[in-house]
Image (cartoon, rainbow, N blue to C red):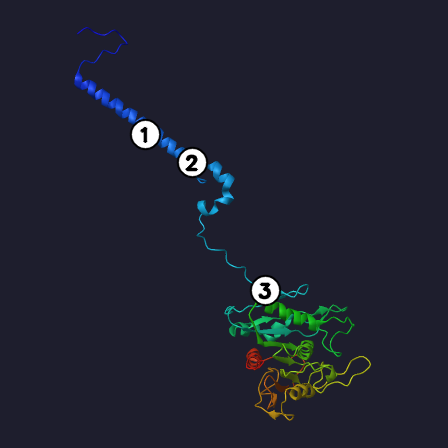
């Protein structure tokens, strides 16, 4: 056979080989058509799908969120309630670790004495650990500063707005309680106050002004309003008053007043007012003496109880015989105060 010139493909004379080449050509043609058809379908899908191209996603993102995003994630947890209240007179609310928002919880406010502060009063009364143990919401707010730079509560004529500022601490404390109750499940049948000296005077004032709200008070070394006619209470309140017979700042037997100081009633008179309002027996009975002042030997404190009270009312006087204005409170003082208060509630 004669060789073909260079660059020229020689003709194929073998029949079997020709059939093989024809089959390959047909296969290549079919493959090319398939690729063109597939490309056409992909173009059609691309034109119809909003999620098929980056450009489409960028221009229609807000419209195709449900088609192109994963909505299976959990919603963000709700913000916890605040723990600071009181506006321009802020106070920290101590929330016990056992607090359950579904369960009504008692609220206790501790009111400091004249020239003291909430934290200082807590050092003396030591109520926070007991509030934690008994699941009680607890706060110790501060009064305002006088011209002398001493914190005070404007409680009664006798104590302790000595520079006649006229500040309405009763409204402040009521607002504080309402604000806390708006964010926490406060048991409206168990809202209590306790305090020392000026704080005890203020506790009496709160019971007079907000008897429908306050379930009970437990005060140390204070006194009731000078004129009982100024007390607006019409409902019974549970009242425990504690006072030392040797108190040189707030006299156990009361004070008749002079040119410099306003009068105030005695410890027994302060309790008798609430015994009468609460429908209790006029004459108290003696309970078992207790020991609450470590500076005085033995069970130095007598207990006088006005029994037979109407629902919602109690009236007791604990007299620390030989006790001074700031007694050396016993180790079980916090338990005694919380026991007495928490056993009593609004009807």
Q: Residue furthest right?
A: 259
Q: Residue at x 23, y 23 (%)?
A: 23
Q: Quadrant of the C terminus?
A: bottom right
Disc number at residue 46?
A: 2
Q: Residue at x 38, y 31 (%)?
A: 40
Q: Which residue is disc 3 drawn over? A: 83
Q: Please indicate whether residue 166 sits to the left or right of residue 235 in the image.
A: right
Helix, strand or loop status at disc 1: helix
Disc number at residue 34?
A: 1
Q: CA distance from mark 1 to mark 2?
A: 18 Å
Residue 329 picture location, percent across and down: 60, 79
Q: Is residue 91 above or below residue 345?
A: above
Foreground disc of the pair 3, 1: 1
Disc 2 residue crowd, few under 14, some 14–19, many 20+, Cα 10 Å: some
Disc 1 residue crowd, few under 14, some 14–19, many 20+, Cα 10 Å: few
Q: Earlier in the sequence, mark 1 or mark 2?
A: 1
Q: Quadrant of residue 299?
A: bottom right
Q: CA distance from mark 3 to mark 1?
A: 71 Å
Confirm whether residue 115 shows in the render: no
- Pick the residue in front: 216 or 54: 54
Q: Please indicate whether residue 19 sits to the left or right of residue 112 in the image.
A: left
Q: Earlier in the sequence, mark 3 or mark 1?
A: 1
């Amino acid at each position: 056979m004669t060789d073909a010139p260079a660059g020229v493909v020689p003709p194929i004379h073998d029949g079997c080989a020709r059939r093989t080449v024809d089959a390959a050509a047909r296969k290549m043609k079919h493959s090319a058509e398939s690729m063109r058809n597939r490309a056409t379908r992909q173009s059609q899908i691309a034109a119809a799908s909003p999620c098929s191209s980056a450009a489409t996603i960028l221009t229609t993102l807000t419209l195709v969120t449900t088609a192109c995003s994963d909505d299976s994630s959990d919603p963000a947890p709700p913000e916890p309630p605040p723990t600071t209240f009181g506006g321009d007179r802020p106070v920290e609310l101590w929330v016990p670790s056992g607090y359950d928002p579904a369960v009504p919880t008692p609220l206790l406010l501790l009111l400091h004495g004249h020239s003291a502060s909430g934290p200082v009063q807590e050092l003396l009364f030591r109520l926070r650990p007991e509030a934690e143990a008994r699941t009680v919401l607890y706060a110790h707010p501060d009064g305002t500063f006088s011209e002398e730079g001493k914190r005070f509560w404007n409680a009664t004529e006798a104590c302790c707005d000595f520079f006649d500022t006229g500040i309405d601490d009763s409204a402040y404390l009521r607002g504080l309680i309402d604000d806390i109750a708006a964010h926490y499940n406060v048991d409206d049948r168990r809202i209590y106050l306790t305090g020392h000296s000026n704080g005890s005077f203020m506790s009496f004032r709160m019971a007079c002004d907000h008897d429908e709200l306050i379930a009970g008070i437990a005060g140390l070394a204070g006194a009731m309003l000078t004129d009982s006619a100024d007390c607006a209470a019409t409902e019974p309140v549970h009242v425990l008053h504690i006072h030392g017979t040797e108190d040189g700042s707030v006299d156990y037997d009361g004070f008749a007043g002079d040119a410099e100081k306003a009068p105030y009633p005695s410890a027994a008179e302060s309790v008798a007012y609430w015994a009468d309002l609460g429908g209790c027996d006029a004459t108290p009975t003696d309970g078992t003496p207790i020991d609450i002042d470590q500076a005085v030997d033995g069970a130095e404190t007598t207990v006088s109880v006005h029994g037979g009270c109407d629902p919602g009312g109690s009236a007791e006087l604990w007299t620390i015989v030989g006790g001074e204005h700031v007694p050396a409170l016993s180790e079980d003082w916090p338990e005694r105060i919380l026991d007495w208060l928490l056993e009593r509630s609004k009807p």
